[in-house]
Image (tube, rainbow, N blue to C red):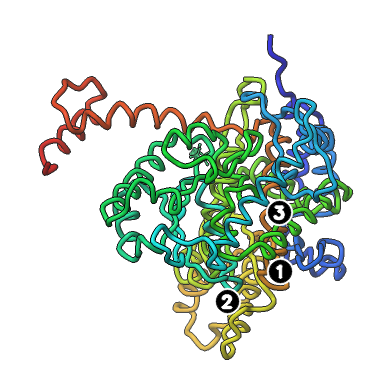
Amino acid sequence: MLQTHPINHTAIWAQLHQHQRSTRFLHMRDLFAQNPARFEQMHVQLHGLLLDYSKNRITEDTLQLLVQLAEAADLRGWMDKMRRGDAINISENRAVLHTALRLPESASVYVNGHNVVPDIQRERERALAFAEAVNNGSHLGAHGDTITDVVNIGIGGSDLGPQMATLALKPYRQRVNVHFVANVDGANLAQTLEQLNPARTVFIVASKSFATPETLLNARAARTWFLQQGFAEADIGRHFVAVSSQVAAATEFGIAPANVFAMFDWVGGRYSVWSAIGLPLMCAVGAAHFNDFLAGAHAMDTHFFNAPLRHNMPVLLGLIGLWYNTFYEAASHAVIPYDHGLRRLPAHLQQLDMESNGKQTGRLGEHLDFDTGAVIWGEEGVNCQHAFFQLLHQGSRLIPSDFIVPVQSHYPLGKQHQVLVANALAQTEALMRGKTLAEAHAELAHLDNQSRDMLAPQKVFPGNQPSNTLMLDAVTPFNLGMLLALYEHKVFVQGTIWGVNSFDQWGVEYGKVLAAAIEPQLANTETLAHDASTNALIAHYRKHHEH
Ligand code: F6P
């Protein structure tokens, strides 16, 4: 008999439900008015990153209760297990050591009695040396040309993290252009290849498993394209490298062993930008900036593992998110970066959070009869103000959000940045304060009664819509490292309290199996035995697709 995770049977869980019922009519506008020290008491700063969590539907009592919930779930114990390399990814019997990837050289972490830090250092040195050689021109193409373009072929965690960070750190760009091809839609690869000179291009085939069909198909297509441009098999060694935990599979695919950069089975795909999967980022920004990026993440790890729970940035972000998700039944959480470079952050966080915590089965196989992972979504500000903010301000749903705002811009163009920041802060203020009916009436004093009575309710903003604001001094490699590690740990905090294994992703597998069965059926005439809808759609495709 499996032991069930009892978190929703604990007294503190019931107490938090009770607390929610007794505080849900409090308005943040009043909480701010009553306590001038609210910001002082509800912010935390770590190096160049400030988290203001005061614009939330919480009181100090809420935070104390949430901390007790974390204690009841033995959050500290699980943090220690993760840090020291215990196999907390139970369903795959693996350690979870993305934090080890940002440890200094002098540290040690043991997996099955083996210190993994020297392995990490070795593979990182190899990958960084390759990136440097590409950038400084010492790694030449097979015909002696300098490399100008690097194409990363990978998907999911082998794409989103490195792509997001490469875009975010564009101001730190070295010499080469870095492209990302993820989708098996031929348009993605074809439109990328159109821009490239094969003599000056290096392809990185990035796949932890080296078994992801989309990636392998794109990698084969890239190799065929390369060979069709007048290159020989022997030239592939200078133009194709791989990153994988399955080194043998990569070499079998035709990548020379010297060109395979290893990652380890104890790092999950969505947590792997810190490993050799970061190779495209290393090529984009160079070794020094990549090391700063790791140092930022390590600074967040150190804070996470040591700061008291009540003042711990990832713990606070996790607990406050969980407060809405579990006790307010808020289904979604928006992430709004006010930084063009961070425009792919919502996509990265979608995978990080939803693939980690989108589960209704506990880590021991028990059914969880409460909601878990939030629907993560978002878009860069201010663009989204002109798209979905109407619903945040006047819609009927509770949607907590994170506003991510750099103090300094890398592109100080006129007053652009000041206007951008003013917009971010104005939105959080409006979401929190709202506008009362009396205020709306007063604004419309010039109208006749009938018009005013019709219009005023439409100008009411209920407010009390929660937000966290994360202010970064600037989007530097170090601060970006801190920011990403912050979200990784937030996800861990929530998963630990809910009792899910945040490090497997069985839910993605089923669709892959069905896709493999359907794919040949699209091109053959075999009798179909799916449901009526799927059968009809396959038949429609067969009839209308031109071979
Ligand atoms: O989508 C499922 C998944 O396994 C992700 O977890 C992973 O990041 C992605 O596929 C790519 O996997 P791989 O790096 O093994 O090709």
Q: Residue at x 51, y 32 (%)?
A: 248
* Residue at image mark 2: 440
Q: CA distance from mark 1 to mark 2?
A: 35 Å
Q: Quadrant of residue 265?
A: top right
- In the rendered image, residue 81, in percent from the top left (x then y), is placed at 80, 32
Three-letter amino acid code of the residue under disc 3: Phe
- In the rendered image, residue 158, in percent from the top left (x then y), is placed at 52, 46
Tell us which disc is closer to us: 3 or 1. Answer: 1
Residue 447 vs 497, above or below: the answer is: below
Ligand 1 is within 8 Å of the C-beta of the residue at disc 3: no
- Residue 147 vs residue 531: left or right? right
Please tell me which residue lies in front, 498 or 50: 50
Three-letter amino acid code of the residue under disc 1: Leu
* Residue at image mark 3: 25
- Residue 262 vs residue 31: left or right? left
Q: Residue at x 72, y 16 (%)?
A: 3
* Residue at image mark 1: 472
